Image: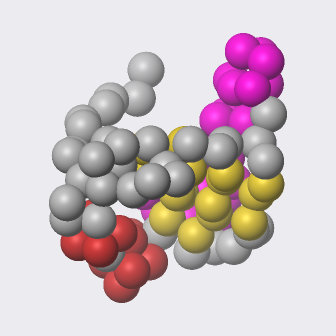
Amino acid sequence: MDLSGASETLDYFIIATGESGLQLKAMQDAVKEDLKEAGIRPKGIEGPSDRWLLMDYGAVVVHLMSPEAREFYDLEGLWADARRLELSAS
């Protein structure tokens, strides 16, 4: 989600869904490793949780969520003013 027009402090949210705690952890590890190789380190990581992991990279925040948490917290609805961008995994 492009938040640059809806927030003064954030530019982007990346929201992804994992089907289990193990999958969420694997996704977290992959994001962390890929960005580390690019010289980018997180400001903070909240979790671990079987429902929601949050990775703070400053202007970009990564949310890795279970389907239930994603539906319950409805970040897309809370940030309805933000422009949605679709990305696919490579």
Instruction: Please indicate, yes or no, whether residue 62 appears anywhere in the rendered image.
Output: no
Residue 2 screen position, x and y as percent: 32, 42
The residue positioned 74% from the left and 68% from the top of the image is: 47
Q: How is the image coloured?
A: secondary structure
The answer to whether residue 81 is above or below residue 26 is below
Give 7 or 44, whichever is nearer the viewer. Answer: 7
Q: Quadrant of residue 58?
A: top right
Q: Residue 29: image x %, image y %? A: 73, 41
Task: Name the residue located 52 percent from the left edge and 53 percent from the top edge.
Answer: 9
User: Is residue 86 left or right of 15 when viewed as pictured?
Assistant: left
- Res 46 seen here: yes
Quadrant location, the C terminus: top left
Query: Residue 74, how many percent across, how many down?
Result: 31, 75
- 25 or 10, which lies in front? 10
Instruction: Tell me the quarter of the picture where residue 50 sits.
Output: bottom right
Q: Is residue 49 left or right of residue 84?
A: right
The dominant secondary structure in magenta is: helix
Please say if 20 is above or below 25.
below
Q: Could you tell me how many numbered marks the image carries?
A: 0
Residue 40 horizontal/vertical position (percent): 75, 26
- Compared with 49, 43 (above or below) is above
Q: Residue furthest bottom?
A: 72
Relative horizontal placement of residue 83, taking residue 32 as reference (left or right): left
Residue 20 vertical position relative to residue 11 in the rendered view, above or below: below
Q: Magenta region: which residues?
A: 14-40
Q: Quadrant of residue 85?
A: top left
Look at 63% across and 63% down and name the residue there.
53
Magenta span has 18? yes
Q: Residue at x 24, y 36 (%)?
A: 86
